[in-house]
Image (cartoon, helix red, strand yellow):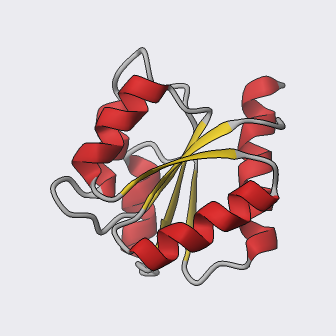
Amino acid sequence: MANARILAVDDSPTILEMIKAILISGGYEVITAADGAEALEKARAEMPDLILLDVMLPKLDGYRVCRLLKFDQKYKGIPIIMLTAKTEEQAMATGIRTGANQYLTKPIEPERLLSAVAEELDKVTG
């Protein structure tokens, strides 16, 4: 889905810039947020085609953001890929249980990230 709009959420400016650069190289439009509250606000205002969401965020953690969006009829169709340093099985299970479509761990290879994004967008567009 070329020109898809992706909301990338991470509290590290360095990681956020890296993710943004990878997504732009894949032909995507990127919106960014640096904390959970801003992520929720931008998701609701911008209606992105997909959200890349860190777990450990200030204000609201990624699990809470995911849950709030997935339990809202208006936003539940937006695919959410959690991208986090939390590699424990329990953290992954929590991510999936809160509604994440995929759970990826950092550091991530650019090709793996673009592949996961394309896969989720393809599911939405058929």
- Viewer-nearest residue: 116 or 5: 5
Split into 4 quadrants, where in the image is the N terminus? top right
In x, y percent, where is residue 82? 49, 59
In x, y percent, where is residue 52? 53, 53
Q: Is residue 46 left or right of residue 56?
A: right
Whether 87 is drawn above or below 91: the answer is: below
Q: Is residue 50 left or right of residue 89?
A: right
Q: Is residue 16 left or right of residue 41?
A: right
In x, y percent, where is residue 125? 79, 25
User: Which residue sits furthest left?
Assistant: 59
- Say whether residue 70 is visible: no
- Viewer-nearest residue: 83 or 39: 39
Residue at point 50% right, 26% down? 47
Whether 75 is drawn above or below 20: the answer is: above
- Viewer-nearest residue: 19 or 73: 19
Residue at point 37% right, 46% down? 98
In x, y percent, where is residue 9? 43, 56
Whether 117 is drawn above or below 58: the answer is: above
Whether 108 is drawn above or below 59: the answer is: below
Tell how many labels: 0
Split into 4 quadrants, where in the image is the C terminus? top right
User: Which residue sits furthest top?
Assistant: 74
Quarter occupied by residue 11:
bottom left
Residue at point 36% right, 59% down? 94
Residue at point 58% right, 84% down? 107
- Say whether residue 99 is visible: yes
